[in-house]
Amino acid sequence: MVLKKETMPTLARTSHKHWPVWNNHFFQRIVLDAVCGGVWYDHLPRPAYRHLTKDQAATAVALCEKIMSGKVDLEMLNQQSLAWRGKTRVIKKEA
């Protein structure tokens, strides 16, 4: 919880300004969706942190650490999360 609610948002506002998100709820959505392999609330009751298995919690922590170290692409995870939610944006390229 500390990584998603405090550490990652702080990094996004300081040393990781290239990240596509900055608020804690965005990090929670992205990480939980990745851990669940889809929209997290389709897989877990609310609040998610109370219903994660030990393996899911460990996977979430490991994923946060990989994101913070640059070993996992946060932009790609965000786009996948948005796609699972039907919120993918089409970016038009100018000719």
Image: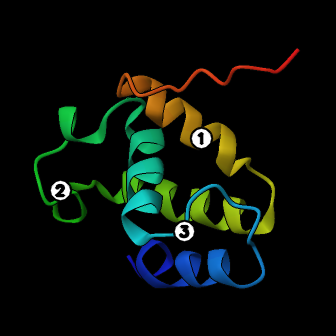
Crowd around label 3: few <14 · some 14–19 · many ≥20 (10 Å): some
Q: Amino acid at mark 2?
A: His
40 or 61: which is nearer to us?
Answer: 40
- Helix, strand or loop at label 1? It is helix
- According to the image, label 3 marks what residue? 22
Judge whether 82 appears above or below 52 on screen. above
Q: Earlier in the sequence, mark 3 or mark 2?
A: 3
44 or 13: which is nearer to us?
Answer: 13
Residue 80: x and y, percent? Answer: 54, 30
For marks 3 and 2, give the CA distance.
25 Å
The image quarter in which residue 14 lies: bottom right
Residue at image position (88%, 14%) is 95
Judge whether 12 appears above or below 75 on screen. below
Residue 51: x and y, percent? Answer: 17, 56
Between label 3 and label 2, give the one nearer the viewer. 3
Residue at image position (37%, 22%) is 86
- Helix, strand or loop at label 2? It is helix
- Marking on residue 51: 2
Going by the image, does 63 lie left or right of 37? Answer: right
Residue 42: x and y, percent? Answer: 20, 32
Q: Amino acid at mark 1?
A: Leu
For marks 1 and 2, give the CA distance.
22 Å
The image quarter in which residue 7 lies: bottom right
For marks 3 and 1, give the CA distance.
14 Å
Judge whether 65 appears above or below 39 on screen. below
